[in-house]
Amino acid sequence: MTHDSKTDEILLDIKGLRKWFPIKSGMLTTVKSYVRAVDGVDLQVIRGETLGIVGESGCGKTTLGRVILGLIPMTEGSVHYDGEDIRMMTNRDLRRRLQIVFQDPGGSMNPRMSVRSIVGEPLTVNGIAEGAELTQRVADLLASVGLKRDHMNRFPHEFSGGQKQRIALARALSLDPEFILLDEPTSALDVSVQAQVLNLLEEIQSKRDLTFVFITHALNVVNHVCERVAVMYLGKIVEIANTKDLFSKPAHPYTHALMSAIPEPSLDKVARRRIVLSGDVPSPANPPPGCRFHTRCPIAEEGLCDVEEPKLESIGEGHSVACHFPLGPGMKLPILGDDQNPPEDDDMPNTVLL
Amino acid sequence: MMPGKLLEIEGLRVHFDTLDGPIEALHSVNLNVDQGQIMGLVGESGCGKSVTSLVTIGLATCDIDEGSVKYEGKELLFSDSESDKKIQEISGRITAVGVLASIIFVFWAILIDPVQGATFLLVFLFVSTASWLVGFAGKSEYRRHQKFMRWVRGNEISMIFQEPMTALNPLYTVEKQISEVMREHDRLVKAETPRFFFKAAQPFLIFFAVCLVLAALIIIQIFSVGPPVIVLVVISAPLLNRVRVTQALVSPLKLAFRAIRLRPQSASAILAVLAFVTVAHLYGFADDAKNLVFLLVIVIPLAASWTLFKNHNAALRSEISDTGHSTNPSIFTKGWVRKSASILLPLLPLGIAAALVMFLMLWMPFSALLGMVVISTLLALPVIMALDYLRLDPAHTQQVISILEAVRIPNPIAVVNMYPHELSGGMRQRVMIAMMMSCEPKLLIADEPTTALDVTIQAQILQLMRDLRDEKGTAILLITHDLGVIAEMCDSVTVMYAGSIVEKGSIEAILSRPRMPYTIGLLHSIPTIDDESEHRDVLPIIPGQVPDPNLHFDGCRFHPRCPFADELCISTPPPMIEVEPGHFAACHHTNRTENVADVQGSFDVFAAEYVLKGVA
């Protein structure tokens, strides 16, 4: 439904995935309600591609990633990796084939372990290498991420953020996995270092024939790295398309607003009118009925959007959107905010004192 | 009209003293913010952006070597005059010696000679006290400056921080925190309910007054002459403010009424229990009632577990047979039973506890019960009253609400009573902005105000800050690492790298005609969402890392990462060259950086060499 019509091999097949976290309260810890972090996600990842998952904080993108890897159990649905249900796979098998790189490289490493033991631990645990061979393999791994052999005996605190992320990547690569989940790998890094890490990721992917799922909130990074992008909002995928299609003709109003909200370091972009969404993301514990975006959507229609939940439907080759009124190419959303004219607000006197 | 200069930082050089020696944080920073201007300060982490801002408002913990920070012509940095410094040093030494000697003579007096020891002790005590006082007087200039800075902060220059959760106090409500800033700077309007007592003493005074009144009430037999005495006390207190005393006496009642209104069910349940116990005691069936309640304590859990068990069995049975018609119709499979059980079961522990308390109340003599009630009321009353007193004045709450409205917080009446953890990230940042705005400063320092926020929320906050500038003319010093935010917000930009300013100019100049190689590299290494421009497979990068602040550089601090670096760059610090009017770049090779594309080309070549050298 959502993947390309090309006869590419589907590596990861997610069907109707739900992850609800119970909210407990009271002395008998009765379950009051659920936080619907991931609420019915269908997604296919094709072998060798980079799939981006974009969304604001709290939209469930990290939870989705963790469920895919089997780090937390799913509530409902199924995840098939290469035709096998991940719930049926042994942990050892799962970890050898699927790996993860976390957002905060400092927090994901034991500060009392040297780089050699951090990167080599998966190899020793799986009985792949030890002794001199282990040292050699760790050195090779470090070289592949652009670090030197003599970095091996240092400790994580001696490295900068970008270098730590390189070490985390080397650790993920150590078991030679087929699939790596990148959970905001560059969010904690500086701009110039982010570019270095992104280039490194692309280089490693082409060398090792890896499949990436790239979770991030930065759409510009997605545009650079990913082939396909899924946009998430409140636990659901609202739009999925090839990167090019998504950026040239976004169909969901949320995607539209998200893209116009990104500040870009170029003056001609600033001149373009931007859509400022009102309000916050609703709580996933109590999502709005119907389309979950209707509370903030400028084109929501009463009686339809707040009642009926739109289904993810294909509107083009590999381009699906969950909206009752998908925007065609070139269509513009009604503008709520404007650079020159701030939105009319009765409480605010629009006097200019400059 | 030429806008006046609001903030002028000139030649600022600071260092941090660490155990490994001094770390130079800033090297001659020059920065100007004009009135009503949005100035962007951009750079990577560790480049000294935040240190600059903290030095400006006098909160930095570093040592200032040289330079000046002028706000509207007034110097914000403080340095003691030479004579003052000398006085402080000498007095400090004398004080230390005097204190040591006094300690010695204490033991002298005890162990050797009491009279001699006491005499010397007195002499040395006098000497150390006198020298300490002289030192204290020598610091008067410093204290005056601290007071001045406290007035400047908040009143004239305000700051909002990156992480609103850590900047707000999690223990106080929003209204409390905003009104605190306003009280410190005398921005609060006159209180509606007058407060005559010294503020901190109020709760204690009330406590004593209430204790006295209640003691009097108990002495003169509450039930006979109590009410007239209350009236007498209230009327015959002309020394105190009558309104306030009446309020203090009535406020517990008011609080009780509010409790009943807010939670009618539990309040009426408690009142019913109390009434039942009183009636039982007065009519002498307390013993029978006690036995009944005791029975309840045993019966309730038994009944509950039986219900659970039955339900479970029934559920199992229907699951196993699953034939559609039930062979053994039990009332526990009925809907209403199950429904009520689901409501009542979670209340079970509470029910048992309540039954036990009721049992105790029926078991003890009535006089003991009354005594306990009186004592607990006496203990609770002052606390309740103090809490009531600590509430904000209605007029001040109204003031806070109007400020929250100005930053477009939806439903401000509810938000004022919330704690920071109840708010979302964007709302917290709005509260920070409201707190900052409450004193209407002329300069706002925003230290990464949107870094922790989502893009759609970031857009809202940026819009709010821009409107603020447009409406109130507040100048903003926007510190960020995101050039996109800079492009959207600022009038002019200053680029920092490793503790020094490398380029500054108007927003157009920096973004479209950058001249410093670092700025050029930084601008290109950001991935864009532009689909028209040619899509490069490899993102252009600046090779290498930001240098360790411990390292000392004679020349340009960017030279290890720069494609144009030569001997001159290593040996001499680059001057700020005015490449076009109002646009300065600190580079020896500004003549080679006119064409941005060429510079980027040399960066690519240089980066490839860099990787070959294997220094990444």
Image (cartoon, helix red, strand yellow):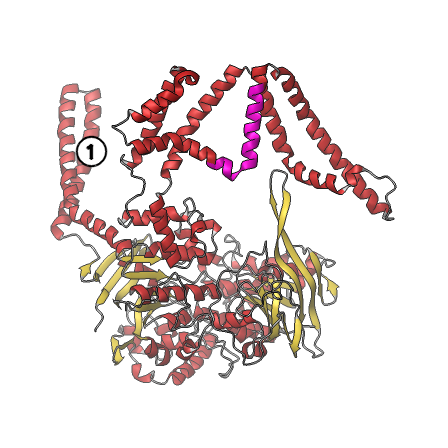
For this rendering, which residue is in front, B358 or B93?
Answer: B358
- Identified by mark 1, the residue type is Val
Q: Looking at the picture, does residue A107 appear above or below residue B333?
A: below
For the N terminus of chain A, give its image quadrant: bottom right
Q: Which residue is mark 1?
A: B99
Is residue B276 in the magenta section?
yes
Q: Looking at the picture, does residue A344 appear above or below residue B346?
A: below
Range of the magenta residues? B258-279
User: Residue at (40%, 33%) from the top-left corner?
Assistant: B251
Residue B360, horizontal then vertical, whole percent: 58, 20
Is residue B122 in the magenta section?
no
Residue A47 shows in this picture: no
For this rendering, which residue is in front, A354 or A202?
Answer: A354
Residue A240, horizontal then vertical, whole percent: 62, 72
Chain containing mark 1: B
Helix, strand or loop at mark 1: helix
For this rendering, which residue is in front, B239 or B78?
Answer: B239
Residue A81 shows in this picture: yes
For this rendering, which residue is in front, A66 or B214?
Answer: B214
